Image (cartoon, rainbow, N blue to C red):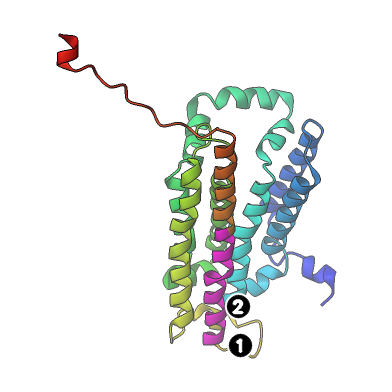
Amino acid sequence: MDLLAWLQPWEFSPTLVLAFLASAWLFLRGLRVHHVGRVRQALFWIGMVLLYLSLHTRVDYYAERMFFIHRVQHLVLHHLGPLLIMGAYPGQVMRAGLPLRWRVWLAGARRRGPVRQLEVLATHRFLIPFLFVLLVLIWLEPTVQFYSMLDWRIYRFMNWSVVISGLLYWNLILDRRPHPPAALSAGGRIFSPVFTMVPQMVAGAVIAFTGHDLYPVFDLCGRALPGFSALDDQVIGGLIMWVPAGLIETFGLLYALGTLMRLSARGRLPQPKRRVPRPSASAVS
């Protein structure tokens, strides 16, 4: 199969194409306003390319027919791609890429109304980490996985949900500002990857060491690669959740630790409030 055939979408999605084109257009327009270094630009474009290749090429065909490829796909969609994109800090750049009238409306909407409430939810320090790990585990439940692989609407919702939750989560963890205005404290950004990493690693270990086929849907659809038994496919998929996903989360933890040390060295961490001792009754008299 030649490269062009690999790049052709398995199931064409105009919504996905428009979303990618709009994001790229906003980022390119924003580059005219903000100076963005080459490293940040590279992170953004590499992340975008990885997401597109995982969502809208022939890779999607194999992800529907091999469990371990499906786990690699979600490793990119949920962890690696969003991590790279949010590591480029694209929010301010993309806002600057909006037409002036839209920027004025957005600035006002962010201070009130539904947009303000949506922003609060999208940066909630407990909700977003919870959704990040929940949307890994819930799609791995065998019954849920069975129906999501057979119904294209559920399948697309599954993929979009892990991408969006990944972007929101890494937006919190990679924030380099002190708290506030950052949603998570510097210490919270260190501990959050621990709480989200452990359940995923446990789930990966359970899948890898289970002695029977948890996901017969891949046999039903027809495994795309010959020579892989159901258990071999399952073991590799579990190990992908266990090791590479854990390494990416560990990187996030170390990055957050570096942010804590930098903020501390610059004296930008919030100082604990000192209690003023009350004068004793004898001193007053």
Q: Amino acid at mark 1?
A: Phe
Categorize mark 2 by other alpha carbons within 10 Å: few (<14), some (14-19), many (20+): many
Task: Please give the name of the residue rendered at 56% of the width and 48% of the height, measured from the top-left corner.
Answer: 256
Which span is picked out in magenta?
230-250
Q: Is residue 26 left or right of residue 115?
A: right
Q: Is residue 40 left or right of residue 217?
A: right
* Residue 76, image x, y percentages: 63, 62
Seen in the picture, residue 248 relative to 20 is either above or below; the reply is below
Query: Can residue 112 be spotted in the picture?
Result: yes
From the image, give the main secondary structure of the stretch colored magenta. Answer: helix
Seen in the picture, residue 223 relative to 274 is either above or below; the reply is below
Q: Amino acid at mark 2?
A: Met
Task: Please give the name of the residue rendered at 55% of the width and 71% of the height, measured from the top-left corner.
Answer: 243
The quadrant in which residue 99 appears is top right
Tell me the quarter of the image containing the N terminus.
Answer: bottom right
Tag 2–tag 1 contact (CB < 8 Å) = yes
Seen in the picture, residue 43 relative to 212 is either above or below; the reply is above
* Residue 210, image x, y percentages: 43, 82
Taking the view exactly as shown, the residue that stands out farthest to the bottom is: 227
* Residue 205, image x, y percentages: 46, 75
User: How many numbered marks does the figure carry?
Assistant: 2
Q: Which residue is mark 2?
A: 66
Residue 66 vs residue 211, the one in the foreground: 211
Tell me the quarter of the image containing the C terminus.
Answer: top left
